[in-house]
Image (cartoon, rainbow, N blue to C red):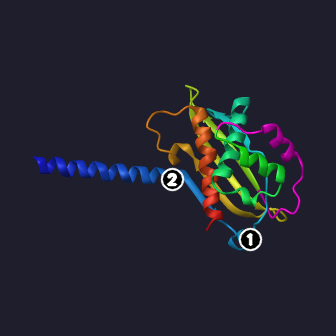
Amino acid sequence: MNRKLYYLSALVLILAICWVISCATFGSYAKVKAPEKMKLVKCIALTEPVLNQKLGRTISKATDETWYNLVNTRFLYALAENGMLDYICDDDLKDVISRATRDKADLEKYHMAMARPGQNTDAVLKTEMEIRLKEDNKGDTYVIMQLLDAKTEDVIIDVKFNTMWGVGYVNKPTTLMTIRDGISGAVEQLANQMKK
């Protein structure tokens, strides 16, 4: 009897490990499309993340200012946390990123730096997020991040990350939680590709 319980426990553990691994695999995608150009990237210009919300079949621009502030703050923090600061060209933007915490950033200075055109940039980072809301106003976040050649706009690195499959939540997460985790997960995937 104990032997059957042991084998059953081992099987459950193996299945749980496979489930966690498959969630992380299906939830994130990062592909270098132009490895020769990636090696030349030394200076990246940022664009502000585009934030959309989807409820049922309707997709619209997100209207919750809290979401925008959270996305921008977490975006800046994730860039610093994942070692992307050296790739940022603008000194003011570098300063904002280096001082960003998980929950606070100088968004006024960030917006001013973003309004200036980048000079001598090798690549531009574009980010688009979609929050897929459910009836209980909780939902998952899907992030698409592309590093584009500054001159040709060819895709250098393509990153996709979603919190439905990329993060193993025990309990149903809040929307703010998935926004935070979505942007952080996508930046981490990008940084991993840049460091290769």
Please report the bounds of the magenta region as a residue range: 103-124
What residue sits 56% from the left and 30% below the top?
A: 138
Three-letter amino acid code of the residue under disc 1: Lys
Q: Is residue 138 left or right of residue 61?
A: left
What residue sits 61% from the left and 33% below the top?
A: 176
Q: Is residue 67 left or right of residue 96?
A: left
What residue sits 12% from the left and 47% below the top?
A: 2
Q: Where is residue 162 in the image (x, y as percent from the top left)?
A: 57, 46
| Relative depth, front residue between 91 and 182 | 91
Q: Distance between the residues labelled 2 and 1?
A: 27 Å
Q: Where is residue 170 in the image (x, y as percent from the top left)?
A: 43, 37
Three-letter amino acid code of the residue under disc 2: Phe
Q: Mark 1 points at which residue?
A: 37
Q: Which mark is residue 26?
A: 2
Say which quarter of the image contains residue 83.
Answer: bottom right
Disc 2 packing (10 Å; few <14; some 14–19; many ≥20): some
* Residue sitting farthest toward the top: 136
Q: What element carries label 2?
A: helix
Q: Where is residue 22 in the image (x, y as percent from the top left)?
A: 44, 53
Whether residue 94 is situated above or below residue 58 in the rendered picture: below
